[in-house]
Image (cartoon, rainbow, N blue to C red):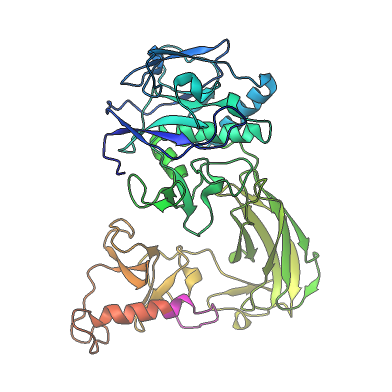
Amino acid sequence: MSRTLAALLVTFAFIAPAAADSAGPTETVRIAPQAHHAAVGTLFLNRCAGGCRVIKSGLNDARTRASTIPVGPETEFNITEFAWGDTEWNDIVTCMKEVYSPYKITITDQQPDPGIPYNESIIAGRPSEIGRSGIGGIAPITGDCGAYNYTINYTFANNYGPNNRVFSLCAVAAQESGHSFGLDHTYAFADGTSGCRDPMTYRNDCGGQKFFRNETATCGESSPRPCDCGANQNSHLKLLSVIGAGTPITRPPTVTVTAPMPNTSIPANTQVLATAAAQRGIKTVELWINGYLWKTARGAAFGANGQPESTYGLAIPPEVPDGVLDLVVKAKDDIDVTTTAPTITVTKGAPCTSAETCAAGQQCDQGRCFWEPAVGEIGEPCTFQQYCKSGLCAGTADQQICTQDCIVGVTDSCPAEFTCLETSPNKGACWFADDTCEGACCGCTVVEAGQPAWLQILAIGLVALFVVGPRRRRPRR
């Protein structure tokens, strides 16, 4: 069923409850559109102390208790209070504050003062109390992906058993409130992994605390589908765009290097071993050698209790020149919160005595081969990648420039005066927009009709240069 612009839909969170109503099939209910409000800055978590009421309406307005969600012949519905006590409630509030902390929003369990725009998350009761059944949560969602406020969303807390209840209720409340900001359901990330670690998912193949992820994802419930407003969704960037940036309060990554030992001589291909963990999970572990990023390892898979603390092995690449090596390991989560381990200094082979034994563009000082900080801007001539701020030096056989990865057909993928040329399926690099093949400008040869020779040469050159190691030596122009 298509979702038209400006239509307001109803979405369900199907997480199996403990008793009474059981999980049911996916369903969407189309209701009348309503006007947008300004982006909300407060999310009110309502435990319905002593019970709370909602009024069936064609519009959503938490200030008057109006909600489009209840069904049945009644007009007014009463929801029973959160059943699991103060300790679990406070844990849920803390979890929601952590989940929303990267964004400029206040999470509170106190009724906002008049004049403060807010959305309301009822975390209490059972679905039968508003005429529904078989669902763990429900919320209105806008078909135009806009942010609304004064909406009421529901997490039916009293239907959940004790197993991982805090994280389950936090995830459902995050998903249902996320719909108020225009978020769709997450199915899978671009790297092929499950969307189970994002609260906007229906998938349950991993557990632990869920966070809005800074990763491109396909949308869907039990199978992938295009997202409401485009082919993909990044729930973290979406919230940044409609709410603004806050200050994360989640614990930063921890990282400890266990091998090699400091001040030792090491053989080629030595593994640097580091143990890392993070509350949001480790996205990448990086190995920096003498100030340059040489190796990156992807974070471990998420399991039943989230991502476990894991040990990562990063082999020192064979292209690293012999000499004194300052090894630095950095651990990052998905929103780039970074922890850096103390430097481990070792020696591989003999310390360098001149740049002749170093990689292209490197200098030698105190036995260390190293590159100066990158200074090359997009479009500047280059002969080695580390000269470029982008980390990418590529081009034709006759001309190499600092460039960057880009997406073909996306106008702002490259800086002004540059265009994105396809170098392989779904991948491109920026090149001069006004470059043409005239006379012998770029070594033109006979090619297929409609394809200029310079583009073919550039594509071949880019592919080749992407894999050229740093030992390639050529005087810079």
Asked whether, in this view, residue 429 is left or right of residue 170, the answer is left
Residue 140 belongs to magenta span:
no
Asked whether, in this view, residue 410 is left or right of residue 276, the answer is left
From this view, report whether residue 168 is shown above or below residue 66: below
Between 437 and 241, which is closer to the camera in this rendering?
241
Image quadrant in which the N terminus is located: top left
Q: Is residue 476 visible?
A: no
Position in image of residue 314 (x %, y %): 67, 67
Please report the residue visible at 74 percent of the width from the left and 80 percent of the height from the top: 349
Total marks placed: 0
Q: Is residue 336 visible?
A: yes
Please report the residue visible at 44 percent of the width from the left and 26 percent of the height from the top: 41
Between 299 and 183, which is closer to the camera in this rendering?
183
- The chief SS type of the magenta part is loop
Between 251 and 168, which is closer to the camera in this rendering?
168
* Quarter holding residue 459: bottom left
From this view, report whether residue 99 is shown above or below residue 349: above
Asked whether, in this view, residue 428 is left or right of residue 97, the answer is left
* Quarter holding residue 448: bottom left
Asked whether, in this view, residue 187 is left or right of residue 284, the answer is left
Position in image of residue 223 (x %, y %): 44, 52
Position in image of residue 198 (x %, y %): 53, 44
Q: Which range is magenta?
A: 464-477
Image quadrant in which the C terminus is located: bottom left
Position in image of residue 338 (x %, y %): 61, 49
* Quarter holding residue 439: bottom left
